[in-house]
Image (tube, rainbow, N blue to C red):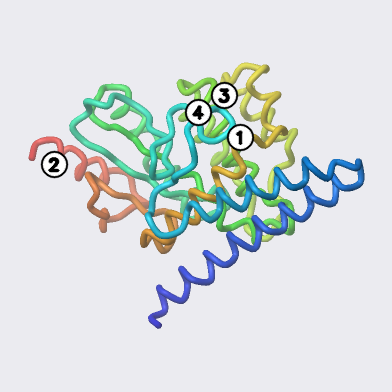
Amino acid sequence: MSTPARARSRELRDVRTAAERRRKKRIRLAAGGGGVLIVALLAAIVISLVNAAGGSGESTAPRGRTAAPAIATTSGALALGSAAAPVRLAVYLDYMCPFCGRFEQANSAELNRLVADGTVRLELYPLSFLDRMSSGTEYSTRASNATATVADHAPGKVLAFNTALFARQPAEGSRGLSDDEIAALARDAGVPQDVVNLFTDRIFEPWVTASTAAVFEAGISGTPTVKINDEVFKGDLYTAGPLTAAIVAAKGS
């Protein structure tokens, strides 16, 4: 097995291990209250969502507020901008990934502009494979769930919130931002309070887990990964300019 393949396999195991850990935690909490039937239902839902991610490379969870954000694609992205845009840009990221932070710093202003002017249909994939790097707090999952919640209820604020999360990106190996800190960033980015209040319900955690597993099984081996019209961009991701030039070239082709 090649080194990239071993890495993908290890990261996929980490994703599923994290899902199983959350499932067992929920079982213990529910059992303490005597909710045996609820325990069984929760376990079935989480297992089915994680298993659904395997094989096809697309999320097969049913659409709906409790399953996937309203603007989610079947492959696990949050679709932003005009569906008629000439360029489709896919960005795979993890909020704990320092290289994603560098990518965001270099390119976010241009990408926001290109989405706003109708050039780019941006597909954000918020992943959770770096949960293991947040000292047990599952920061990647919590941040991605918050982003998915904003996408479901206030999609016009996703890019501002995404930028805010990276502007305050915690270091790998730290505990990450607290739920209160994530909520404060969202409010500062213009997310309505009633949407922020939903973050701790963790509605979209199963969707994040399933989408992460599907993405890695489909061949993505790390973050950030960027695709222009389904082709992996192999240029400089960390300097302003090269990605914009490639997008403009794709628009004219």
- The quadrant holding residue 60 is top left
For marks 3 and 1, give the CA distance: 13 Å
Would you place residue 42 above or below residue 85 in this image? below
Q: Quadrant of the C terminus?
A: top left
Q: Residue at position x 70%, y 56% from top?
A: 174
Question: Upstream in the sequence, badge 3 or badge 2?
Answer: 3
For marks 3 and 2, give the CA distance: 32 Å
Q: Residue at position x 68%, y 60% from top?
A: 173
Q: Amino acid at mark 3?
A: Ala
Between 251 and 50, the one lying in front of the other is 50
Q: Which residue is mark 1?
A: 146
Question: Upstream in the sequence, badge 4 or badge 2?
Answer: 4
For marks 4 and 2, give the CA distance: 29 Å
Q: Looking at the image, is mark 4 or mark 3 nearer the viewer?
A: 4
Q: Residue at position x 58%, y 59% from top?
A: 15
In-image side of 50 versus 81 (left or right): right
Q: Which mark is residue 132?
A: none
Residue 18, given in percent of the width and then of the height, sits at 66, 58
Question: Upstream in the sequence, badge 3 or badge 1?
Answer: 1
Q: Looking at the image, is mark 4 or mark 2 nearer the viewer?
A: 4
For marks 2 and 1, give the CA distance: 34 Å
Residue 193, given in percent of the width and then of the height, sits at 67, 17
Question: Upstream in the sequence, badge 2 or badge 1?
Answer: 1
Query: Counting other residues with Cα less than 10 Å from the Cα at mark 1, is it few (<14), some (14-19), or many (20 or more)?
Result: many
Q: Which residue is mark 3?
A: 189
Q: Amino acid at mark 4?
A: Ala
Between 141 and 60, the one lying in front of the other is 60
Question: Upstream in the sequence, badge 4 or badge 1?
Answer: 1
Q: Residue at position x 52%, y 64% from top?
A: 12
Would you place residue 186 above or below residue 190 in this image? below
